[in-house]
Image: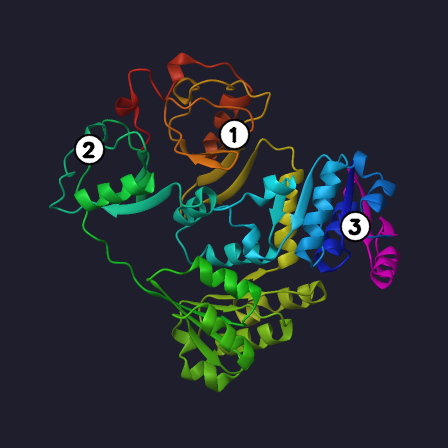
Amino acid sequence: MENVIIVGAGEVGYYLADYLSRKRSYNVTLLDNSEEQANLADQELNVSVIQANGSSAKELMNVKVDSCDCFMAMTWDDRTNLIACSLAKALGAKQTIARIHDQTYIDQSVLNYEEHFGIDGLVNPESLCAIEIVQPIRNQLRFIMELYAQGEIEVEFLQVDESSKLKGKEIQELDLGSNLRIAYLQRDDRIYVASAQTRIFAGDLLIFFGEPKELRNYEKKYFKKAYTKVKSIVLCGASEIAIAIIRLLQRKHYQVRLIDSSEEKCSYFTKLFPDLTVLHGSPASHRLLEEERVGEADFFIACSSMDEENVMACLQASRLGAQHIQVVLNNSDHEDALRSLSDVIGLKSIVSPRVATLNKVREYLSDEKYSRIGSLPDTHIQIIEIFIGSKSICLNQEIRNIGIPKGCILLGLRRSSEILVPSAEKVLRGEDRLLCLAPEDKIDSLLRVFYNRPVNVDQLFFQKEGIKKTMIA
């Protein structure tokens, strides 16, 4: 049984403690500095509840943090969470996870805050909700790669026209270089894994990935700029989640409007995002939403901190004909009622900060050797991340020699804070993480390559003759 300590008995901490306590494999201790919060949790949860300061080394020692398998700081205060996790790690906790709100701690351009504080994971509920909300809006593969690679690797969808220099060539003839790949080829609404001998025709959509500079240069050389339809998005509620959503949609082909009843919040958002259209008024006002032609918007997202306002805004948007409606659920007490109304309101999805946090925490707690991140729309192709542990049979081997099943593609390699294009000559190390595309029926075969079987030379996908003859496409 694993020992889990959670600091903070608020909405998120309480939910995590309740969920994990129902799993027989976890022994949960919940800490909170508030006598009221601690007493409430003690009455309602089947966990050990202690009124204590989670950022005090002495009090952490009293709860035997050195025997803790996973320590989570889930209070509303970022500094408390960072200090608590840093202390817990120093005192012997095996794994630490801190909840944070400030985007500063996610930005690694100046400093890696996780490494600095000795924390295994930073969890931002607002960002997790925003990512869940934005995925139906953004292209799934491009969006996931952007989040995973943080700009070090990009994905681009480029169409071959009649005048293209690539028309009629085989994949192996393309001058792609070492940091550029073709993931898949889409032809007549079907996606194919292209072999080295696959010939390219006009109308084919090539899915490239690789180093951004090389990708831009290749695009300029061989492709015309593609037209992208501008998507209209309406956000109701000037919240932290709204900020995270807007940051994920800061591109020219997204027209984002924000509605909020607080003049102060509207002013703040106008200063924060000068190009954003901000409207002061009630998100639940039928007249305002009608004037703004919300019914014609591609996406309507109710993301305020008040569930009642979100529900009313969704009802009004539904009456006006909005097709894709999403809502943020802040209070767990409203969940059953809201889900029972989802068909009436026309909700496509209900997003909850506490559920998003739980799903992320479960990834840290999981013993699985891989995690599913998403899938390519209208296909059976999954986007997964594989962890290269100390027991992997592929440790210290070049990728060209490990036998990737045909149809599976390695998109990115995460090594500590570094993101690499997984070229054939890269050597796998312990703690590496590989982002992969794999058809549903090939996932087991792909995992066996890394963990359960010796290398079969006849099944190698990367051959020693060179990358050009074995281009993953």
Outermost residue on the left side: it is 163
Instruction: Give neighbour class at mark 3: few <14, some 14-19, many 20+ (Cα, 10 Å).
Output: many
Q: Which residue is mark 1?
A: 432
The Cα atoms of the two marked residues, 2 and 3, are separated by 62 Å
Residue 138 to residue 445: above or below: below
Give the camera-side residue of 85 and 407.
Answer: 85
Residue 238 seen by the camera: yes
Q: Which residues are magenta?
A: 22-50
The Cα atoms of the two marked residues, 1 and 3, are separated by 32 Å
Residue 187 seen by the camera: no
* Image quadrant assignment for residue 222: top left
Q: Which mark is residue 199?
A: 2
Q: Amino acid at mark 1?
A: Asp
Tag 3, which secondary structure?
loop
Q: Earlier in the sequence, mark 1 or mark 2?
A: 2
Write the residue at 72% across / 34% down.
94
Mark 1 vs mark 3: in front: 3
